[in-house]
Amino acid sequence: LSPFSGRFVDVANIRLVSDYGDDIGWNLGVLFKPTPRLRIGAAYRSDMDIELEGDAEVSPISTGNAQFDAFVRTQLPPNQAINTTFPFPAIASAGIAFSPNDRWDIEFDVVRMTWSQFEALTVNFETTPAAGFTRPQNWEDSSSFRLGTNIEATPNWDVRLGAVYDQNPQPTEAVSPLLPDADRIGATMGAGWHAGPFVIDGSLMVLHFKDRSTNGLNAEGFNGTYKTDALLWSVNAGYRF
């Protein structure tokens, strides 16, 4: 709060930068084939806690008042090392696939993610601990539902189509500029080429997030409605032994 204008002003920018983190997890999967054209499977991937270390870079923002700016600089924390731990959820999935003929494969999957582990985001400042912060999240477990098909168009080409509905795990109180989330609907398309041991696949996902409002409940006053769309593409090249 500037004593000269009586208004709130932005006095600094803090940029948080981290290195990559890692953890060790495990996977388990089973596949049952009651008939040559019917397959039922399930898989589980363990949760992981990723420890991240990095730096906080503090940059003053001029308010246009030299006296006030000089005072603010004495109150800002210095550049310093920071750390946090981010929980990644366990993922359980089950699916059923059916091949009505030799050219078509159709699959339906249900995926459950334990996002309830993400209770808060805490960033620790190592030089000035008082500058650290905790942002409550209190996410909930969520599910997604996926339907896809693979069609053998020619002996060397496959065509793939799919759809997904993904529930968001984020309570309304946690919707903010940090990581706004919403239920999403997606459509996928792709193609694959294979000849002998060589495989090349490409895909595109069009993802639409439903409009998500904070409903005036954001704890920090960052209220509004978030609208998001995304295009996700991938290319994979492989060699089969």
Image (spheres, helix red, strand yellow):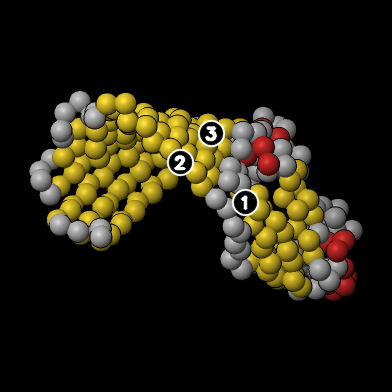
Please, what is the three-letter code of the amino acid marked with disc 2? Gly
Quarter of the rendering occupied by the C terminus: bottom left
Q: Which label is found at residue 48?
A: 1
The earlier-in-sequence mark between 3 and 2 is: 2
Residue 179 is left or right of residue 152, and the answer is right
Query: Which corner quadrant holds the N terminus?
Result: bottom right
Residue 79 screen position, x and y as percent: 76, 74
Which residue has dot 3 on it?
A: 112
Q: Which residue is mark 2?
A: 29
Report crowding for label 1: few under 14, some 14 to 19, many 20 or more residues within 10 A (C-alpha): some
- Earlier residue among tags 3 and 1: 1
> Residue 195: x percent and y percent?
14, 56
- Position of 98 with respect to 133 (left or right) is left
Q: Amino acid at mark 3?
A: Arg
Q: Is the residue 46 above or below the residue 182 in the image?
A: below
The alpha-carbon separation of the residues under discs 1 and 2 comes to 18 Å
